[in-house]
Image: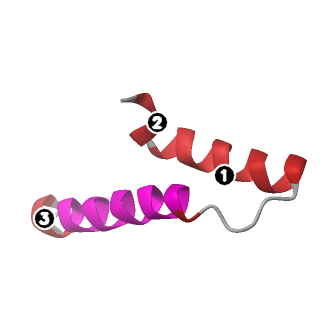
Amino acid sequence: MLALLPIAALSDGLRDVLQGGAPMPWGDALVLAVWAVLGLGAAAKFFRWE
């Protein structure tokens, strides 16, 4: 469950690349992309300039 949070995906992906020289962590990038889409969708729905 905690692996699906954006901070976990970001830290795991950066750790793998910087410490181990791993290739692009696509799973972690996908988690971050899903959070970005959900965040933008929520902002578009609930934010108002009033």
Whether residues under marks 1 and 3 lie with C-beta atoms below 8 angstroms apart, the answer is: no
In primary-sequence order, the first of circles 1 and 2 is 2
As measured in the structure, the alpha-carbon distance from the residue carrying label 1 to the one carrying label 2 is 11 Å
Figure quadrant of residue 22:
bottom right
Amino acid beneath label 2: Ala
Amino acid beneath label 3: Glu
What is the crowding at mark 1: few (fewer than 14 residues within 10 Å), some, or many (at least 20)? some
In front: 6, or 19?
19
Residue 47 against residue 12 in the figure, above or below = below
What is the crowding at mark 3: few (fewer than 14 residues within 10 Å), some, or many (at least 20)? few
Q: Position of residue 11 (x, y in %)?
A: 66, 43
Whether residues under marks 1 and 2 lie with C-beta atoms below 8 angstroms apart, the answer is: no
Q: Position of residue 38 (x, y in %)?
A: 26, 60
Residue ID for mark 2: 3
- Is 24 positioned to the left or the right of 17 in the image? left
Element under disc 3: loop
What is the crowding at mark 2: few (fewer than 14 residues within 10 Å), some, or many (at least 20)? few
In front: 44, or 26?
26
Q: Which residues are magenta?
A: 27-43
As measured in the structure, the alpha-carbon distance from the residue carrying label 1 to the one carrying label 3 is 39 Å
Residue ID for mark 3: 50
Q: Work out which quarter of the rendered image holds the C terminus and state it.
A: bottom left
- Is 37 positioned to the left or the right of 8 in the image? left
Q: Main secondary structure of the magenta part?
A: helix
Element under disc 1: helix
Residue ID for mark 1: 13
Tell me, yes or no, whether the highlighted magenta stretch contains residue 2.
Answer: no
Q: Position of residue 46 (x, y in %)?
A: 12, 59
Count the marks.
Answer: 3
Amino acid beneath label 1: Gly
